[in-house]
Image: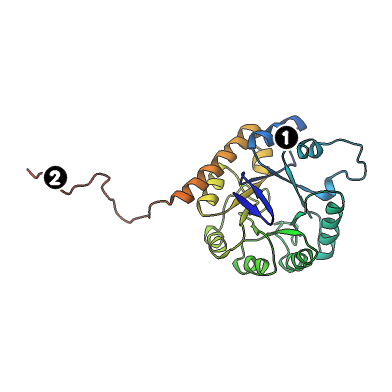
Amino acid sequence: MLKIGHHSFNSRLLLGTGKFPDAKIQKEAVQVSETEILTFAVRRMNIENPQETNLFEELHAKRFTLLPNTAGARTAEEAVRIAKLGKASGLCDMIKVEIIGDDKTLLPDPIETLRATEMLVNDGFIVLPYTSDDVVLAKRLENLGAHAVMPAAAPIGSGLGIVNPHHLKLIIEQAHIPVIVDAGIGSPVDCAKAMEMGADAVLLNTAVSGATDPIKMAEAMKLAIQSGRLSYEAGRIPKKQYATASSPTEGLLSN
C-alpha cells in the first residue's frame, strides 16, 4: 500500500496525461495501467468553463485521484498561486511542486523548490516536490515537512533511465517518506530497477505516451513496477565475485 499523507493507494504507478496521440489512446492507456493517480499541469486544465467536459472529469468520476502540478512556475510564489488555484477548483489537496530552473535540462530550481515546499506545507497542502537526485536536498525537503520526494531518474522526457543509481539509492535509504522516482524513465527495465532499489513508486508520462504502442507500454510499465516491488520485498541474492554451485556437493560419493 502506497501512503501519501492521509491518502492510500494500491497502485505504485503514477501516470502523466500529456502528449498522447489522441484522447482514445490516452484513455485506454490510463485504464490498462491501473494507475490510481493522474498528474497534470493546472495551467493546462480548463477550469474557467465548468460546463465543458474533459478527460479529467470523466476519469475522476470513476476511481482516479488527480495530482495537480505547478509546471510553468519559476518562483515559489508562482507555485503557491498555482497550487491554491488548483485546490480552489475542487482538485486534490495533494500538489506536485515543479519549479524549473534551467530551460535546457529542465532541472528544478532547488532554492525555489525548498521555499515553495515550506510555504505549501504551512498552508496545509500535501506536498510532493519534484527534485534532482541531490541527497542533501531530498533530506532538506523531508525536514521541511514534504509528504514525499520525487527525485528525477534523468532529465524530463529524455528516456535515459536512472543515470545516477548511487545517489538515488542513498535518497531511498535515508528517507522516512515515500520516494517517487519521477522523470527520465525510458522503459519497463528502468521501472523495475527503481522499484527493486526500494523506491515506493514511479511517475512517468513520455515513456508511455511517446511509445509506438502506448497502450501496451502502459501495461508493461504496470507489470514492471509490480515485479520490481515484489523483488525488493523478496530480497535478491548478494552479488559474488566467483561462482557458487547451485547443487550442494557435500555428501557426494567420490570415485
Q: Residues within 10 Å of mark 2 (few under 14, many from 20)?
A: few
Q: Residue at position x 66%, y 55% from top? A: 4
| SS type, badge 2 | loop
Q: Which mark is residue 252?
A: 2
Q: Position of residue 101 (x, y in %)?
A: 75, 62
Q: Which mark is residue 212?
A: none
| SS type, badge 1 | helix
Q: Residue at position x 43%, y 52% from top? A: 235
Residue extending farthest left: 255
Q: Is residue 202 above or below residue 61?
A: below
Nearest to viewer (mark 1 / mark 2): 2
Residue at mark 1: 26
Q: Is residue 193 above or below residue 99?
A: above
Quadrant the C terminus occupies: top left
Q: Position of residue 204 (x, y in %)?
A: 66, 46
* Residue 213 shows in the view: no
Residue extending farthest front: 6
Q: Amino acid at mark 2?
A: Leu
167 lies left or right of 246: right
The answer to which of 185 and 82 lies nearer the viewer is 82
Q: CA distance from mark 1 to mark 2?
A: 60 Å
16 lies left or right of 175: right
